[in-house]
Amino acid sequence: MTGQPKVLHYINGRFAEGEAGVYFRNINPFTNEPINEVAEGRKEDIDAAVRAAKQAFDGGPWRTMPVEKRLRYLFRIAELIETYADDIAYLEALDTGIPISQAKKQAARAAENFRFYAEMVKTRLVGEAYQVNGQFLNYTVYKPVGVAGLITPWNTPFMLETWKVAPALATGNTVVLKPAEWSPLTANKLAEIIDEAGLPAGVFNVVHGFGETAGAALVAHPDVRLISFTGETTTGMDIIRNSAATLKKTSMELGGKSPLIVFADADLEQALDAAVWGVFSLNGERCTANSRLLLEQSIYDEFVARLKERVDRIVIGDPMNPATELGPLIHRDHWERVNRYIEIARQEGASVYAPGVPKGLERGNFVPPTLLLNCRNDMKVAQEEIFGPVMAVMSFADEEEAIRLANDVKYGLAAYVWTSDMKRGHRVAQAIESGMAWVNSPNVRDLRIPFGGTKYSGIGREGGHYSFDFYTEVQVVHVAVGDPSIPPLGKAAPSSALSAERT
Ligand code: NAD
């Protein structure tokens, strides 16, 4: 073990081992040696966490305290994330293999999530009022939903956890977080930070463990009113099925196979920067990665030649080295899965281009940056999410074909268009079936805009005020301010026949 302490659950304001007292091993992706042990949550631990969260919700004071006071806790959490940013980045790099320089940026974004939602609740969580014919006033109020179940994946885990925790807490819900089993360290750090920020006991809880046990128990729990899920499409389908019996709200942020389209008139150097960054940063384990590159035929050879030069120079290495650009994949199982896809690409007739992994890194889960050249869009590797540093590259003849290829996939998360013809840029972006599209831009996202996908990439949008639709219930209050006439049922003079019958 590398000396990291055991990871415990955080339930009702206390760090606690699970009721069954069982642990699982957490593995370092750079060495494949154990980092430490993690409490393995079971149904009874989920029950305890939900009980604490429900008590904290029903009994207050979280949702009933002055909103300014509640939001001060969120600002405090943001400050503490910044104070511990180096520790968080270290733990994230240790646990996931994300290069430390990239993990640092993710920690900064996590702090921003808390500040942003605190500001949003103060300024944008507003209702509407309707005057109805001078007779009525109808107005809306937004209320927290109750106990929020948050289930997160192992890619950029800290950022994605805070992306859910911040709006859930800011709107007055209480939370049970079930982080991914392959990346528990920073979820534990978040619990420490929230503990230090002094939130009332039970408002925020973390139960570690596996999806099929801890995750499924959270989804099935009758006192959990909503599930915000980020992860694989098939898991999302299971969660929707399993949450039906207790009629929960669900938000689904799922997989992707996003196209990056480069027209011949584009700024090729910038398009190249964006294509390389978009699929090889974060070790390719990024939901919005441009894992399909569509190149206009006339620039295919030139662009691919330049792409190969870049790929050759990407610095592969120890995630703790600030110079590293590509680290090891999260887990041996995932490494095997990604390698299987590369083998399938060969069998399907793609030509695979990848530099070797430098000597001395054999123990880690390294996959070099890999180009699958001369792909056809109907190949498995052009259709299925690989979720590693692997990009399927293909060519198109004209705009119509580019759009057809871009849409000929079951996913619809992100899309990127590069062209100097702005009319075409807008036209193509809008023709693509995706929740988000970028034109002549890398994947930069403002927190005010909606985030989410269409087709098999998800249901619902989070981000900005869109998160309020999910994390709150809207209630309408109807008030009579005039003197409305009410049909006077039962006020008519009794007919003699009816009164005779009744007597
Ligand atoms: P995953 O679906 O395997 O696991 C995600 C989480 O769900 C984990 O915490 C896991 O324990 C839990 N889980 C698994 N089975 C469950 C069940 N039956 N009931 C309840 N919980 C269960 O996903 P992953 O491999 O951790 O993450 C990678 C996937 O996440 C990729 O497909 C990626 O595209 C997707 N992702 C999507 C977005 C987005 O915003 N659209 C963002 C990041 C990642």
Image: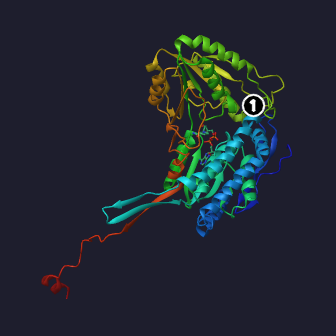
Residue bearing mark 1: 327
Seen in the picture, residue 381 relative to 109 is either above or below; the reply is: above
The reply to whether residue 456 is in sight is yes
Residue visible at 72% across and 54% down?
191
476 left or right of 53 in image = left
Is label 1 in a helix, a strand or a loop? loop
Indicate which quadrant contains ligand 1.
top right
Seen in the picture, residue 305 relative to 80 is either above or below; the reply is: above
Residue 83: horizontal and vertical position, in percent? 77, 49
Question: Which residue is nearer to you in this view: 22 or 371?
Answer: 371
440 left or right of 357 in image = left
Residue 283: horizontal and vertical position, in percent? 69, 31
- Residue 485: quarter of image: bottom left
Residue 350: horizontal and vertical position, in percent? 60, 17
The reply to whether residue 180 is in sight is no
Seen in the picture, residue 482 relative to 182 is either above or below; the reply is: below
Residue visible at 75% across and 19% down?
356
467 left or right of 357 in image = left
